[in-house]
Image (tube, rainbow, N blue to C red):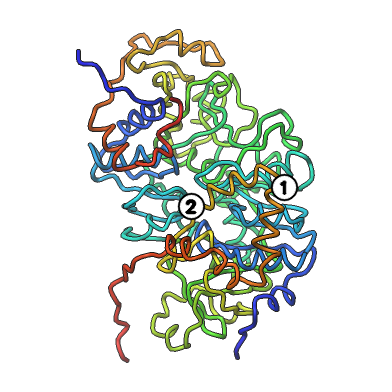
């Protein structure tokens, strides 16, 4: 059964005001196109969870989509502060809930595996445990020692961008894998965006690379360049210049709103966004090929 | 004695941090200056350094300077790429990492680190910092942790405002009692010198960079900084180290310019 729909339709149908949204991807394959569509559709009161909120949540918070963020590292990776989320927290305008990376990912792992909680080893750093009542302790029934626990994180909707998928939602991804697989199993609904839609035969040619199976996926959207200014390994480069530029833009509320006007509200979809970036940026993000050696699954 | 080549504070710290790495170490690499230190070590005295990035990359050989911890250049040509859960569980927690590099807004007398908030009220932070990321677990489980930070009084308070990552807590005994697998912060590299824990876990001044003084170190530390009985002097930076840093690793000067 084909689940192929336009991105706007998938967001309208599956993302509701007040939802807990997890837009996946550790630096890689961040689903910016879906984030921008959520902004365009003026979704409100979302709880936005990501290990690294990155620019995508800075933009969604600036657009007024969020009431709360859940994170483990709130910075502009390699650049500095995530100015909008930070300012909103410091001003008391945005709720937040915080973990270490491992705590955050352990929550997803628990949810993905259908477990009641995930045990973690104590690290000696107890202040976060005091600040976040969801981080608790139990006695290990085997050693008698205390272990830390975190509860499962079940997003209402996860958005995952992949290199290629078939129309049913069987997805291949490679490069940095972040938490994409875990969140697809943890979430109640999964929206997939893909650089390429391929025949099921392509998926079946390399089954080890299928990290997300169709049975977890509600909607499949064909959205080339959906990750910009993040990247898709082997398809286009990370736009580091934009990450640096955002550091400047986000110093002024006016500049941020003007940017949203031009690049989010002012375009219909990702295709228009990509063409507006222009040939110079497109050329800068091109990447030379470096294919892997093929593997042989054998004919049985 | 020949004059050492002039360098910035950042270069001085990166070069001295690189020298702490041993050939064959498995190192959990942070982005920015630690990344430069690790790549410098690999191109000088530690060609068998195995670099692991928290984005899930093992055995990275970046052809260009990665701006972020998740740059695609880390992936192409790496030995292995795994999920975030696996990198923290199978690699770090399982005890497969020798060295971790940490930084933070505050490092206190016992090497505890704050990267979360400035102020005394978590719910109303004066300054909201990025938070732990991978640091909380790296500080507990990497065998040796090194901290890189400019030597400034506000960065070295007597006690951190928020305990993001454990150093020696209230003293070495307290860390030992918890049974944390890692040995804790075994060295702090600053632009003035080098601090190491004494037998109680208190950071004391054990080395100065050429031209720096004990007074400079003490004036820029927020507690009464003790000086090791045998204070060493670090080796001057070399032309080779500077050439690799400036020409090969960070030709645009993104991380090298800091601190004049």
Is A192 situated above or below A25? below
Mark 1 against mark 2, which lies toward the viewer? 1
Q: Residues within 10 Å of mark 1 (few under 14, many from 20)?
A: few
Asked if residue A165 can be seen in this view, the reply is yes
Quadrant in the picture for the C terminus of chain B:
top left
Percent of width and height locating residue A55 = 60, 53
Vertical side of A147 occupied by B231: above or below: above
Q: Are marks 1 and 2 in contact (CB under 8 Å)?
A: no
Q: Residue A124 sits in which quadrant?
A: top right
> Distance from label 1 to label 2 (Cα)?
23 Å
Q: Residues within 10 Å of mark 2 (few under 14, many from 20)?
A: many
Residue nearest the observer in this picture, A213 or B176: A213
Circle on res. B64: none
Q: For mark 1, give the secondary structure.
A: helix
Quadrant location of residue A157? bottom right
Chain for disc number 2: A
Q: Which residue is mark 1?
A: A254
Answer left or right for A89 relative to B93.
right
Mark found first going from the N terminus, 1 or 2? 2
Picture coordinates of residue A118, whole percent (x, y): 60, 56
Query: Are both tags, 1 and 2, on one chain?
Result: yes
x and y, in percent, of residue A273 in the image: 59, 67
- In the rendered image, the vertical position of residue A234 relative to residue A79, given as above or below: below
Q: In screen coordinates, is B134 left or right of A63?
A: left
Location of mark 2 (residue): A240
- List x then y, in percent, for residue B67: 45, 48
Q: Secondary structure at mark 2?
A: helix
Q: Could you tell me which chain the residue with mark 1 belongs to? A: A
Q: How many marks?
A: 2
At 53% from the left edge and 59% from the top edge, which residue is drawn? A229
Q: Is residue A147 visible?
A: no
């Amino acid at each position: 059964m084909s689940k192929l729909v336009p991105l706007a339709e998938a967001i309208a149908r599956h993302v509701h005001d007040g939802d807990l949204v997890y837009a996946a991807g550790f630096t890689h394959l961040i689903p910016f196109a879906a984030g921008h569509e959520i902004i365009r559709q003026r979704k409100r009161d979302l709880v936005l969870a990501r290990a690294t909120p990155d620019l995508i949540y800075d933009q969604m918070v600036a657009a007024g989509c969020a009431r709360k963020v859940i994170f483990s590292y709130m910075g502009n990776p390699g650049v500095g502060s995530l100015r909008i989320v930070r300012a909103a927290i410091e001003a008391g305008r945005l709720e937040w809930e915080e973990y270490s990376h491992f705590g955050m990912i352990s929550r997803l792992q628990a949810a993905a595996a259908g477990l009641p909680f995930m045990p973690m080893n104590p690290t000696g750093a107890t202040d976060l445990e005091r600040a976040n009542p969801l981080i608790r302790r139990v006695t290990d029934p085997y050693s008698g020692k205390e272990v830390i626990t975190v509860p499962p994180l079940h997003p209402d909707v996860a958005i995952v961008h992949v290199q290629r998928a078939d129309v049913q939602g069987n997805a291949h991804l490679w490069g940095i894998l972040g938490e994409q697989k875990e969140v697809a199993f943890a979430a109640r609904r999964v929206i997939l965006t893909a650089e390429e839609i391929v025949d099921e035969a392509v998926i079946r040619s390399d089954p080890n690379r299928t990290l997300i199976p169709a049975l977890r996926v509600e909607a499949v959207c064909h959205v080339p360049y959906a990750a910009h200014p993040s990247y898709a390994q082997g398809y286009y480069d990370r736009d580091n210049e934009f990450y640096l530029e955002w550091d400047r833009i986000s110093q002024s509320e006016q500049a941020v709103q003007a940017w949203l006007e031009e690049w989010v509200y002012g375009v219909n979809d990702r295709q228009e966004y990509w063409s507006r970036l222009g040939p110079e940026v497109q050329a800068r993000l091109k990447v030379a090929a470096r294919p892997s050696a093929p593997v042989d699954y054998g004919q049985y | 004695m020949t004059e050492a080549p002039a360098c910035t504070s950042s270069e001085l710290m990166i070069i001295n941090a690189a020298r702490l790495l041993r050939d064959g170490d498995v190192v959990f690499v942070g982005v920015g200056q630690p990344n430069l230190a690790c790549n410098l070590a690999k191109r000088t005295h530690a060609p068998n350094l195995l670099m692991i990035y928290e984005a899930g990359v093992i055995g990275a050989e970046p052809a260009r300077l990665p701006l972020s911890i998740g740059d695609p250049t880390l992936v192409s040509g790496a030995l292995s790429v795994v999920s975030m859960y696996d990198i923290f569980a199978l690699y770090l927690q399982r005890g497969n990492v020798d060295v971790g590099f940490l930084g933070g807004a505050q490092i206190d007398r016992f090497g505890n680190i704050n990267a979360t908030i400035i102020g005394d009220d978590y719910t109303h932070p004066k300054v909201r910092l990025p938070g732990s990321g991978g640091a909380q677990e790296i500080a507990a489980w990497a065998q040796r942790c090194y901290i890189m930070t400019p030597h400034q009084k506000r960065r070295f308070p007597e006690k951190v405002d928020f305990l993001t990552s454990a150093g020696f807590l209230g003293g070495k005994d307290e860390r030992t009692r918890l049974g944390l697998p890692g040995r804790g912060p075994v060295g702090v590299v600053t632009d003035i010198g080098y601090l190491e824990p004494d037998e109680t876990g208190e950071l004391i001044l054990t080395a100065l960079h050429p031209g720096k003084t004990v007074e400079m170190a003490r004036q820029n530390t927020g507690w009464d900084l003790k000086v090791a009985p045998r204070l060493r002097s670090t080796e001057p930076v070399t032309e080779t180290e500077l050439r690799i840093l400036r020409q090969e690793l960070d030709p645009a000067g993104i991380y090298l310019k800091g601190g004049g």
